[in-house]
């Protein structure tokens, strides 16, 4: 099982609150579905993630990988157990949000 760090959990909570208020419940459900797909992908092939989100190569850090799932960039640790450390909207200015 891949868990979320407290920071990632807070980010998800913020997305869900925003979605429920502005985009509707379906958007919040899509986020949760994207997280479940991301967890499966990470568990199956953790080395397949990118060193950084494509638009932001400067975010490369030792011990962290990134995948895009749906409309979200998801960062995770390469340690065992794996932990999702961040969730960012794909079009967000990620360097200024981390």
Image (tube, rainbow, N blue to C red):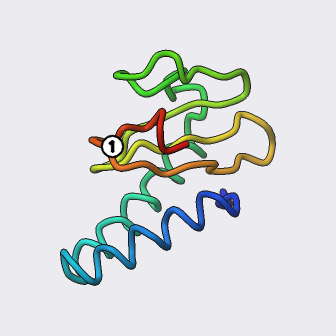
The residue sitting at the top extreme is 57
Q: Where residue 55 sits: x, y (%)?
A: 34, 22
Residue plotted at (69% across, 50% down)? 83
Residue plotted at (49% across, 66% down)? 12
**Quarter of the image holding residue 93?**
top left
Q: Nearer the viewer, residue 82 or 64?
A: 64
The residue pinned by badge 1 equals 92
Q: Where residue 2 sits: x, y (%)?
A: 66, 57
Residue 18 vs 77, above or below: the answer is: below
Q: Where residue 92 sits: x, y (%)?
A: 33, 43
Residue plotted at (72% across, 21% down)? 62
Q: In the figure, is residue 22 to the left or right of 34? A: left
Residue plotted at (43% across, 27% down)? 53
Q: Where residue 80 sits: x, y (%)?
A: 81, 42
Q: In the figure, is residue 64 to the left or right of 94? A: right
Q: In the figure, is residue 45 to the left or right of 70? A: right
């Amino acid at each position: 099982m891949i868990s979320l760090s407290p920071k990632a959990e807070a980010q998800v909570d913020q997305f869900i609150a925003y979605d429920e208020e502005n985009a509707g419940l379906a958007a919040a459900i899509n986020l949760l579905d994207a997280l479940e797909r991301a967890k499966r992908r990470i568990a199956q092939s953790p080395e397949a993630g990118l060193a950084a989100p494509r638009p932001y190569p400067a975010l490369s850090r030792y011990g962290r990988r990134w995948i895009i799932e749906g409309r979200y960039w998801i960062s995770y640790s390469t340690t065992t157990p794996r932990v999702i450390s961040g969730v960012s909207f794909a079009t967000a200015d990620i360097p200024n949000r981390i």
